[in-house]
Amino acid sequence: MLEDEVVKKLAEVKTYYEKRANEMENEVSILRSLLEIIDKILAEKSFKKIDISKTKSLSETSEYKETISIKATDGISLANIYVGEGQIKLIPNIEINFDVNSPPFKAFLITRIFDKMREKDIESAKKGDISVDEIFSYRVEQKDNFLKEIVIENYGDERRLYELRNAIRWTLRRIYEKMASPGDQS
């Protein structure tokens, strides 16, 4: 008799947990969909149209349809990212010397972001999901170990652009902050 009650209670508990698990899975699915929508809106709203009349070098920016300004937390302009069809060009503030050998630049931006995107695209090309011509590639131009520009070809979709913009912003801000407070090694 007691054993029957335990089995009945266990069955009720199991039913309850299955119902809760399904509700939570549905909620997670809805939250992921909402996050995708928010990411898309943020990517669209964060772009600024280029005002060609205020651009100093038309040859460098006229082929790009949008520009993204990267600023430090103190408001200093760190760089501009020019976005074109399949291409991004980053031009840093000429008054700031971003060392390409600094850990956030090499270990994070190049190795963890750029190289990983390239590897992923190479795998996608091997599977036939994209053509070889669509593989992510980048070129870092420097002078005396200081960043002059980054050109990225085949950056992909809006989501990837958003990820690149955030990674570049974090990297440049981190280098700038370390330059601003050289005693802080954290």
Image (cartoon, rainbow, N blue to C red):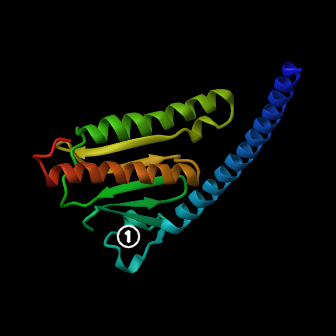
The secondary element bearing badge 1 is classed as helix
Q: Front-most of 33 and 44?
A: 33
In the rendered structure, the answer to whether residue 148 lies left or right of residue 120 reads: left
Asked if residue 119 lies left or right of residue 183, the reply is right
Viewer-proximal residue among 124 and 35: 35
Please provide percent x and percent y for residue 81. Answer: 40, 59
Q: Is residue 23 left or right of residue 165?
A: right
- Name the residue rendered at 80%, 41% in the picture: 19
Residue 90, located in which quarter of the rendered image?
bottom left
Quadrant of the image containing the C terminus: top left
Residue reaching furthest to the bottom: 53
Instruction: Look at mark 1 in the image and give the residue it sits on.
Output: 58
Q: Position of residue 72 (x, y in %)?
A: 28, 61
| Relative image position of residue 155 (x, y in whole percent) | 52, 47
Task: Please rate how many residues cluster around mark 1, counting C-alpha atoms within 10 Å: few if below 14, some from 14 to 19, many from 20.
Answer: few
Q: How many marks?
A: 1
Q: Residue furthest front?
A: 1
Which amino acid type is marked by label 1?
Answer: Leu
Q: Residue at (53%, 48%) from the top-left corner?
A: 160
In the rendered view, tell whether residue 102 sits above or below residue 161: above
User: Which quarter of the figure has residue 140?
Assistant: top left
Residue occupying image coordinates x 73% and y 39%: 21
Residue 127: % across, % down:
67, 28
Decide which of 58, 86 is in the foreground and name it: 86
Asked if residue 64 is positioned above or below residue 118 in the image, the reply reads below
Q: In the picture provided, is 151 more to the left or to the right than 132?
A: left
Q: Which quarter of the figure is the N terminus placed in?
A: top right
